[in-house]
Image (tube, rainbow, N blue to C red):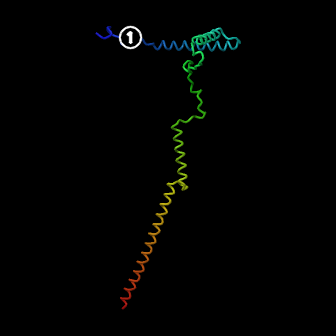
Amino acid sequence: MPKGGKKGGHKGRVRQYTSPEEIDAQIKAENEKAQEAEYEESRGGAAGLPSKDKQDQSSDESDEDEDYQQKRKGVEGLIDIENPNRNAQSSKKVTQLEIEGPRELSRREREEIEKQKAKERYMKMHLAGKTDQAKADLARLAIIRKQREEAAKKKEEEKKFKDATAATGKGLQSMSLNK
């Protein structure tokens, strides 16, 4: 026997679902009430006098506010608390949203944009030769250019020396042949 002493529990009971027809009927009833309310608003606005239903609703709302005020005890009466859950939140339609207005960027988007701008600034300074890395690169290039110039001079001197020795060697051969 289970611990509870009863056989079976709350699970497994027959569930009752609302049929689609009942849901449609409820939606139609709500729409009809909304249309009647709009009709009475337009009729009441045209007559210049508010309808009885509106007067009853406003008195009911004030009664609820008074009850709320009376229920406060002790320090609660001194502290005015605004509860965001107390008011019913209305959802906005897509047509009501302001798409054209400026959109705030998220933190990641702002950081990404700042990173790109910093990279561009660094590249401009690097190309201008103002960064430490650019200065080091230019110094290294200057040293390499000097080394290449010296190597080119040495090659030219060696080439001239070889040409000179070759010319003197040919001159000696031709002299030896002439003898």
The spot of residue 175 in percent (x, y) is 38, 88
Q: Quadrant of the C terminus?
A: bottom left
How many numbered badges does the structure rendering display? 1
Q: Residues within 10 Å of mark 1 (few under 14, many from 20)?
A: few
The type of residue carrying mark 1 is Val
- Per the image, label 1 sits on a secondary structure element best described as loop
The residue sitting at the left extreme is 1
- From the viewer's perspective, is residue 149 above or below residue 121? below
Q: Residue at the location (49% across, 63% down)?
A: 142
The spot of residue 7 in percent (x, y) is 31, 8
The spot of residue 94 in percent (x, y) is 56, 27
Task: Please state which of residues 169 and 177 is positioned toward the viewer in this rendering.
Answer: 169
The residue sitting at the bottom extreme is 179
The residue sitting at the right extreme is 48
- From the viewer's perspective, is residue 31 above or below residue 119? above
- From the viewer's perspective, is residue 148 above or below residue 171? above
- From the viewer's perspective, is residue 95 above or below residue 46? below
In this picture, residue 132 sits left or right of residue 63? left
Q: Which residue is mark 1?
A: 14
In this picture, residue 52 sits left or right of residue 157? right
Task: Please state which of residues 27 and 97 is positioned toward the viewer in this rendering.
Answer: 97
In this picture, residue 72 sits left or right of residue 143? right
Quadrant of res 2:
top left
Task: Please state which of residues 95 and 120 is positioned toward the viewer in this rendering.
Answer: 120
The spot of residue 78 in percent (x, y) is 60, 17
Q: Quadrant of the N terminus?
A: top left
